Image (spheres, rainbow, N blue to C red):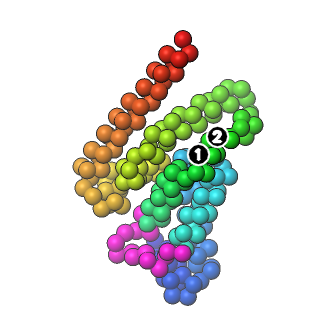
Amino acid sequence: MKDELKWIQLIKKKGSQEAANQLVSSYYKEIYAYVYKQTLNKELSMDLTQEIFISMLHSIQHFDESKSSFKTWIYRIATNRVIDWYRSKNYKSDRLTESIEDYEVESEEDFTLSIERKEEVEKITEVVSKLDTFTQQIFRLKLFAEYTFNEISSILQLPEATIKTKYYSMLKRVKSTIEEDNHAKRKASN
């Protein structure tokens, strides 16, 4: 934390490349994992993570440590970037062109589980990406970054009760939509 603030100050005051590298290195794996949990695509996650850190470096002059921690700030940037990607034309295009050849097959069972997990995450992400940005932030921070309601409350600067209410009502909506989708698929296959 102490080093982090020192690096930020060096970047702000002197544009220090070394400090920027240190700051990025200290958060890279964590942010990449956060993005990967939402995309399940290595290359895309690497690209988005790179974009997140580029955005962070471009806007670091606006970071105010008296308002939030750096970790909170970088997760907000990451969350917004992931939301933007899911709303983009590229996401819609990638979904149509994705090939089964893109999957690495270790065993048939692993492959099947991998496909099922990816389909589940895609269904959930599709439903969530239609929600307002605020609700998406809550969902992504809770599910993918594994933040507590208290931490999300401090990130979004809202009462914890509001965060919980939004999160649980959103979960009901996601579950209901997925159940309806599964019911429609079963009905269509009969």
- Residue named by callout 2: 96
Measured as percent of width and height from the top left, residue 32 is found at 58, 56
Measured as percent of width and height from the top left, residue 152 is found at 35, 55
- For the residue pair 107 and 63, the one nearer the viewer reads as 63
Q: Quadrant of the C terminus?
A: top right
Is 69 magenta? The answer is yes
Q: Are marks 1 and 2 in contact (CB under 8 Å)?
A: yes
Measured as percent of width and height from the top left, residue 67 is found at 34, 72
- Residue named by callout 1: 92
- For the residue pair 52 and 152, the one nearer the viewer reads as 52
- For the residue pair 18 and 15, the one nearer the viewer reads as 15
The kind of residue tagged 2 is Leu
Picture quarter containing residue 57?
A: bottom right
Residue 171 in the figure: left or right of residue 105: left
Q: Residue at x 40, y 53 (%)?
A: 133
Query: Up-down: is 75 above or below 62?
Result: above
Q: Is residue 33 visible?
A: no
The kind of residue tagged 1 is Lys
Which span of residues is magenta-colored?
58-72
Q: Residue furthest top?
A: 190
Q: For the residue labelled by badge 2, is the local secondary structure a helix, a strand or a loop?
A: helix
Q: For the residue labelled by badge 1, is the local secondary structure a helix, a strand or a loop?
A: helix
Q: Residue at x 61, y 51 (%)?
A: 90
Query: Up-down: is 118 above or below 94?
Result: above
Q: Residue at x 47, y 27 (%)?
A: 181
Tell me how far mark 1 sits from mark 2, CA to CA.
7 Å
Q: Is residue 21 visible?
A: yes
Residue 92 in the figure: left or right of residue 4: right
- For the residue pair 52 and 4, the one nearer the viewer reads as 52
Measured as percent of width and height from the top left, residue 72 is found at 42, 63
